[in-house]
Amino acid sequence: MGEKITLKITKREVLGKKVKTLRHQGITPGVVYGAGMEAVPIQAEAGEVLRVYKLAGKHTPVQLLGSERRIAMIKDVESYPTRSNALRHISFHAVRADEPVIAEVPIRLSGTGESEAERAGLVVLQALEKIKVKALPMDLPEALEAPTDGLVKEGDRVTVGPDGVELVDSDDGREGTADDDTTVKDLVVANVYEPSALAAANDAAAGEAESADAEQVEVTGEAEKTEASE
């Protein structure tokens, strides 16, 4: 965890379509909800909301400072189609500091320069860009670091199995709850390939995809002919 991310909020009295007046005033409307509490409409200065979203994303807790202090995760944002300097709406899911949560964090390959495998002309291919982890809200990492220094030969792999958090294999894609998910110890996030073998595998995969597409077109065409003749 880096520095705590905070956002000053106030309870929002303007609701429904009238919130457009808030946006014209440089204020972003939002809502805070969670287990055991009623959803609370809130608002905050638009520039601060955008800053917090860029820092926290959906994987870092935010301390909401208002009439009550809450720890929350950003669950959803609504953006402007043609603007990048503000958000139309933001939703927070309040969490307890003493209860684990599940969040998706990015995976970063790291190392001190090129690995021995790369210097030998091999290719290091990252297989996963992000992974769900389970931890107390304030212990959630900004990212998981996966060092590549030990990669030497074709077939070598990079795995992550970080201290302080658990890797989660979730079947239904839910975040924000630690119930009914299976934890895993280690996960392969990158592999070392020989360039020509990798190219051949890519060509084979592309050929299979083209064959499947052609077969689908043929089946669709036959079905249309059958319908037309009936």
Image (cartoon, rainbow, N blue to C red):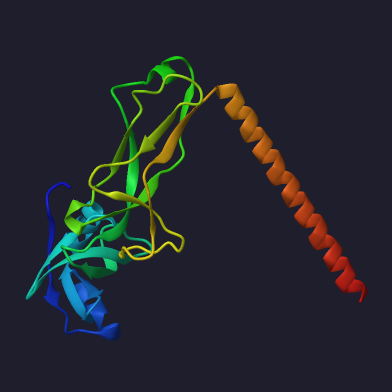
Q: Give the x, y percent position of residue 111.
A: 30, 26
Considering only vertical position in the picture, is 70 above or below 163? below
Which residue appears at 8% of the width and 72% of the height? 66
Image mark count: 0
Q: Position of residue 185 (x, y in %)?
A: 36, 44
Could you tell me residue 167's position as x and y percent? 34, 49
Residue drawn at (54%, 22%), measured in percent from left and top? Answer: 194
166 relative to 26 in the view: left or right: right
In this view, the residue farthest toward the left is 67
Residue 19: x %, y % from top left: 24, 80
Q: Is residue 155 left or right of residue 228?
A: left
Task: Give the quadrant of residue 53.
Answer: bottom left
- Please report the residue visible at 26 percent of the width from the left and 63 percent of the height from the top: 74
Give whichever of 139, 38 is nearer the camera.
Answer: 139
- Quarter holding residue 51: bottom left
Looking at the image, residue 24 lies above or below residue 176: below
Nearest the viewer among 185 and 203 is 185
**Identity of the residue drawn at 71% across and 42% down:** 208
- Camera-side residue of 118 and 192: 192
User: Residue 75 appears in which quarter of the rendering?
Assistant: bottom left
Name the image quarter holding the C terminus. bottom right
Residue most extreme to the right: 229
- The single residue placed furthest to the top in the displayed view is 120
